[in-house]
Amino acid sequence: MMEEEEEEEEEEEEKEEEEEEEEVEEEEEEEEEEEEEEEEEEEEEEEEEEEEEEEEVEEEEEEEEEEEEEEEEEEVEEEEESWEKK
């Protein structure tokens, strides 16, 4: 009779240990998932920032081009005017 009780107790303990291990594993998995999500979010943010920077640079370049074109047009106009005067 005593042996049976001991066996049962042992089985109970084993079950409990297994459950604890499973819990710990689950927690670790959750933590890993969270970390991965955070990393993904960070990467996305970085990508967005890069895109924004690229857009800004493009805009600046376009503005510079426009300015140059305007200057050229002005020069051409001035030249034409000077020709007309002659």
Image: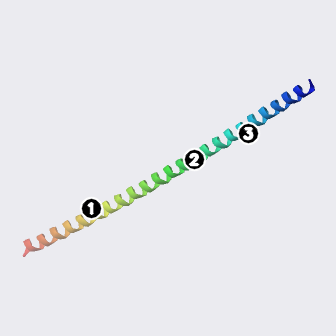
- Closer-to-camera residue (29/18): 18
At x 79% / y 34%, what residue is drawn?
14
At x 31% / y 60%, what residue is drawn?
63
Q: Could you tell me residue 43's position as x and y percent?
A: 51, 52
Residue that carries the numbered disc 3 in the rendered image: 21
Q: Sequence-wise, which precedes: disc 2 or disc 3?
A: 3
Task: Pick the quarter of the image with the C terminus.
Answer: bottom left
At x 27% / y 62%, what residue is drawn?
66
State the CA–CA distance, disc 2 to disc 3.
22 Å
Q: Quadrant of residue 52?
A: bottom left
Q: Sequence-wise, which precedes: disc 3 or disc 1?
A: 3
Q: Dot 3: what SS?
A: helix
- Closer-to-camera residue (28/68): 28
Q: Could you tell me residue 22's position as x and y percent?
A: 70, 37
Q: Could you tell me residue 2's position as x and y percent?
A: 92, 26
What is the number of the mark on residue 86? none
Q: Quadrant of residue 5?
A: top right
Task: Pick the quarter of the image with the N terminus.
Answer: top right
Q: Dot 1: what SS?
A: helix
Query: Which mark lies nearer to you, 2 or 3?
Result: 3
Neighbourhood count class around disc 3 (C-alpha, 10 Å): few under 14, some 14–19, many 20 upward = few
Q: Amino acid at mark 3?
A: Glu
Residue that carries the numbered disc 1 in the rendered image: 66
75 to 38, vertically: above or below: below
State the CA–CA distance, disc 1 to disc 2.
45 Å
Q: Amino acid at mark 1?
A: Glu
Q: Could you tell me residue 71's position as x and y percent?
A: 24, 67
Q: Answer whether labels 1 and 2 touch (C-beta < 8 Å).
A: no
Q: Dot 2: what SS?
A: helix
Residue that carries the numbered disc 2 in the rendered image: 36
Q: Does residue 86 appear to the left or right of 24 in the view shown?
A: left
State the CA–CA distance, disc 3 to disc 1.
67 Å
